């Protein structure tokens, strides 16, 4: 019996020692172990605050039918196709506005406008001429999105009211409207496609 008692005590002691060995040991700390962070005051209590990059949460699109899926894929293709043209138009328009502001000489301003027009035509004339009606309509909307100005207003400012009227008449013949504006609430599919592609805000 004494032997069993001794064996029991020995086993308990061994188990205690083993349990102590399995306990996590505190890690040594040094001068570089302190993490500096911002603090914010919430109801009188200072709470650590870490600033992270903006995270966009997007729902998974569920289509009612294959036809809806195909239509959305066509829209996405068209948006991706014309967005580079809209970005270029916005960049050149903004650059031109800055250049025009440097002089009041009408002849110099006209040369600036003609140079800008020639540059855009030389880069994308063939591609833009081959756009479909749907792609052209999207391009007109995206130009307004990127510049905050309709295509009609841009033509009127740069080429005059008569040119704007003529361009609008031609556009109407092909089913377009240069005065069309972009409303992200009405164009939710286009806006979602743009944001998924990284165009989170206007003029970017």
Image: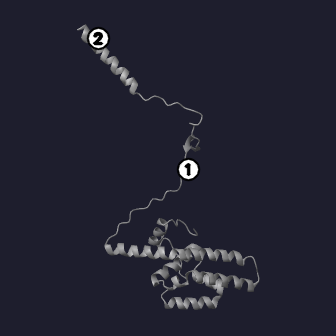
Colouring method of the image: one colour
Q: Residues within 10 Å of mark 2 (few under 14, many from 20)?
A: few
Marks 2,1: beta carbons within 8 A: no
Q: Residue at x 48, y 59 (%)?
A: 56
Residue 87, how many percent across, how many down? Answer: 56, 73
The N terminus lies in quadrant:
top left
Percent from the top left, x then y, of residue 125?
Answer: 55, 84
Nearest the viewer among 146 and 148 is 146
Sequence-wise, the earlier of marks 2 and 1 is 2
Return the mark for residue 181.
Answer: none
Q: Please name whichever residue, 177 or 101, is drawn nearer the observer in this view of the structure.
A: 101
Is 24 rendered above or below residue 119? above
Residue 38 in the image, given as x and y percentages of width and height: 59, 44
- In this rendering, does residue 148 appear at all? no
Q: Nearer the viewer's eye, disc 2 or disc 1? A: 2
Q: Secondary structure at mark 2?
A: helix
Q: Position of residue 69 (x, y in %)?
A: 35, 72
Q: Which mark is residue 6?
A: 2
Which residue corresponds to the image point at 51% horizontal and 89% vertical from the top-left? 172
| Distance (Cα) linking label 2 and label 1 | 61 Å
Is the C terminus in the top left, top right, bottom left or bottom right quadrant? Answer: bottom right
Q: For this view, does 27 lie left or right of residue 147?
A: left
Q: Could you classify mark 1 by the number of other residues whose Cα lies within 10 Å: few (under 14), some (14-19), or many (20 or more)?
A: few
Q: Secondary structure at mark 1?
A: loop
Q: Residue at x 40, y 25 (%)?
A: 21
**Residue 139 showing in the rendered view:** yes
Left or right of 124 in this view: 158? right
**Image height of 11 relative to 70, above or below:** above
Furthest residue to the top? 2
Q: Quadrant of residue 60?
A: bottom left
Task: Provide the residue designation for mark 1.
Answer: 51
């Amino acid at each position: 019996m004494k032997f069993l008692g001794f064996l029991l005590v020995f086993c308990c002691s061994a188990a205690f020692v083993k349990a102590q060995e399995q306990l996590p040991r505190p890690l040594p700390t040094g001068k570089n172990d302190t993490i500096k962070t911002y603090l914010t005051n919430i109801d009188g209590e200072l709470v650590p605050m870490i600033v992270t990059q903006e995270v966009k949460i997007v729902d998974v699109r569920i289509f009612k039918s294959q036809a809806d899926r195909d239509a959305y894929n066509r829209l996405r293709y068209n948006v991706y196709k014309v967005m580079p043209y809209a970005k270029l138009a916005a960049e050149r328009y903004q650059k031109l506005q800055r250049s025009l502001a440097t002089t009041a000489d009408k002849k110099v301003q006209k040369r600036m406008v003609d140079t800008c027009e020639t540059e855009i035509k030389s880069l994308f004339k063939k591609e833009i001429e081959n756009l479909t009606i749907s792609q052209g309509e999207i391009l007109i909307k995206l130009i307004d999105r990127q510049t905050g100005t309709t295509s009609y207003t841009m033509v009127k400012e740069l080429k005059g009211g008569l040119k704007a009227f003529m361009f609008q008449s031609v556009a109407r013949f092909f089913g377009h409207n240069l005065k069309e504006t972009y409303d992200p609430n009405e164009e939710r599919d286009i806006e979602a496609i743009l944001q998924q592609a990284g165009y989170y805000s206007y003029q970017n």
